[in-house]
Amino acid sequence: MPREDRRITFTNAELQEALVAHGMRTKSPFPNGKIVDLSPSQDGGGGLLLRIFDDRAGKNYSLALRPEFAAAALIQFCKGAGVPIPRRATKRLSIVGDNLCLQISLPEAVDRQTFLVQVVETTDA
């Protein structure tokens, strides 16, 4: 049986737009500034570490982000943009180059409860 694998890549501006919108929906406001870099969190929890430049204050700061929050934001962003995301697919976040990607896999038989989200790789490309 064929298997579907897709990777949707988001620029830092698109990621920020998704996080701001999701933050407003969940009453978790995104801080002022612009995302300038992202990397896997070093705490072993599969999260993201964003480096944000606040031009008002003129300085960089870091923001730790749970993978579930980022994935929910990106999925809602895709819905708003008309990009279909299968509910029963396994979803993973990865960092490719300077961009965050949502990897979607539809194996031949998927448990309807499957929803795995964590940063699984960092590659340069």
Image (cartoon, helix red, strand yellow):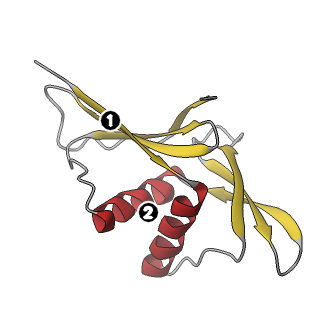
Residue 24 vertical placement versus 7 (above, below): below
Mark 1 highlights which residue? 6
On residue 73, which mark appears?
2
Residue 59 coordinates in the image, percent (x, y) = 88, 68
Question: Residue placed at 52% from the left, 67% from the top?
Answer: 19
Dot 1 surroundings within 10 Å: few (below 14), some, or many (20 or more)?
few
Farthest residue to the left: give it: 1
SS for dot 1: strand
Query: x, y (%) of residue 92?
Result: 42, 39
Q: How would you rate the neighbour count of disc 2 (Cα within 10 Å): few for under 14, some for 14-19, many for 20 or more?
A: many
Side of 105 where 68 appears, left or right: right
Give me the residue at 14% from left, 25% from top: 108
Q: Residue at x 57, y 41 (%)?
A: 46
Instruction: Classify 85 as above or below 120.
Output: below
The amino acid type, in three-letter code, at marker 1 is Arg
Q: Residue 3 at what x, y percent from top left?
A: 20, 24
Which of these two is toward me, 29 or 83?
Answer: 83
Describe residue 55's horizontal placement relative to residue 35 as left or right: right
Q: Nearer the viewer, residue 82 or 2?
A: 82
Q: Identify the amino acid type marked 2.
A: Ala
First reached walking from the N terminus: tag 1 or tag 2: 1
